[in-house]
Image: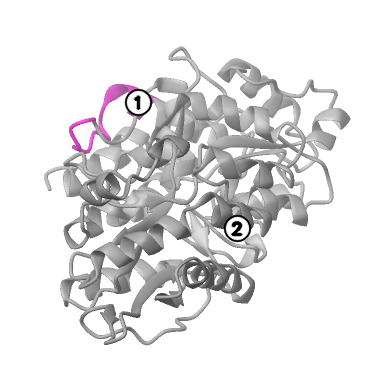
Amino acid sequence: MRKTTAPVAVIAAMGLALAAGCGGDSGGGSGGSGGSTDSDGNTTLTWAMWSGGTAERDAWQAAADAVHEADPSLTVELETSSFDEYFTKMATRIGGGSAPCIVSVQSLRLGALQAGLLPLDDLIESSGEDMSDFTDASLAGLQGDDGSQYALPYDDGPMVMLYNKERFAEAGVPEPQIGWGVEEFESAAQALSADGAYGVSAFPSDLVMFSSVLARTGVQPVAEDGTLQLTDPALVDGVSWYGDLVHEQQVAPQVAGVDSTAPYNAFIAQTTAMVPDGPWDLLNIQSQSDFEVGVVTLPAGEAGPRTLSAGSGFGVSASCPEPEAAFEAIRTLTSTEVLTQLASDGRALPSRTSAQQAWFDNAPAGAQEALAAATESAEPMRVTDDWAQVGTAVIQFVGPVLNGSSEAPDALEQIQAQYGGR
């Protein structure tokens, strides 16, 4: 997910329709182990995390400091890089045996890192960690294809629809209600598309587009057995409908290039009245907007209310020489106290229900109800091990579909042919 307080306009595009800021690497790595214990029993662990700038890094440093405060024998050394750099670097470090002890993981990228992570189930059981406070979706998103828990989550992210309350009022369109349907959405988008402005922002990045497609059709791009199913007839129909919003119904602007921040910038600039997004951006968008932001569930199709979720958390590298200490540090990093502070600082919606109120206290009116409803129907977005490449291909091939220069069946068949057999 995007985790940043930087302006959306400078958030770097992610291949999975998520983004983070472009902070530079602040750590030089920790050699081959990522952790060590001295003769006095004091353990030092390296923790790698992505960051969008100084303010965000300061929040993560405060979390690292909380580990030492909870257990003075543990010291966590934080190193950060931009989101786009992070996963490329981490895959290389895991492959070379130089991974940090504490590895930050994003649910859509877990498959690419799973082989270098330690399953946490035994550590969870032996520690007596109470997992019931974590939301089901946040836990499920960080479980591997073998069913093991590979990270403890720190945030939860069901996709919802943000809307401009003032644009709705000016157009005389009733505000959307939780549980609204696709026909109501299309009617509102058409009424809001006038005088050079549009009803909705659309972009072919995976989490944004496929969450809208799921809400309409009930189908994900990856089957439950982990195979790519981009040519599933219902999914093709859903992507065709999504493209029609741009070139047929003309309720969304044309897609220009591969800038996945454009939909959010257009929403903030009030040239579009709605945009699908997750809670990781909500407080940031609210702070930059000169209008009241509303939050509602994604418009549902015949399958009923559905949405995708994504989240992030912290795991232990398989090469870590101090796995028990690393897990204890992660327990603190994902504790109610630390997550409450991160929520107060404007980070994403906490994975622990006991810490979520601090985030809702800063959110727009109605956000808590909308996110609660979205969470009820949320399912983690299933991905393949090479999803970073698939997500990039989706933007490349489906962008022209939205603009009307190619057809959804052809574009999806090309991607399926290239990646479906892996």
Residue 76 image offset from top left, x and y in percent:
42, 75
Q: Residues within 10 Å of mark 2 (few under 14, many from 20)?
A: many
The relative height of residue 256 versus residue 139 in the rendered view (above or below) is: below
Q: Is residue 223 visible?
A: yes
As drawn, the label of residue 342 is 2
Residue 80 image offset from top left, x and y in percent:
45, 75
Which corner quadrant of the image does residue 231 belong to?
top left
Q: Secondary structure at mark 2?
A: helix
Residue 383 image offset from top left, x and y in percent:
29, 43
The residue range painted magenta reads 224-237
As drawn, the label of residue 254 is none
Residue at the (49%, 80%) spot, across then down: 24
Q: Is residue 232 magenta?
A: yes
Indicate left or right for 85 with 349 as reference.
Answer: left
What residue type is disc 2 on?
Answer: Leu
Q: Is residue 296 visible?
A: no
The relative height of residue 80 versus residue 70 in the rendered view (above or below) is: below
* Residue, far front: 40
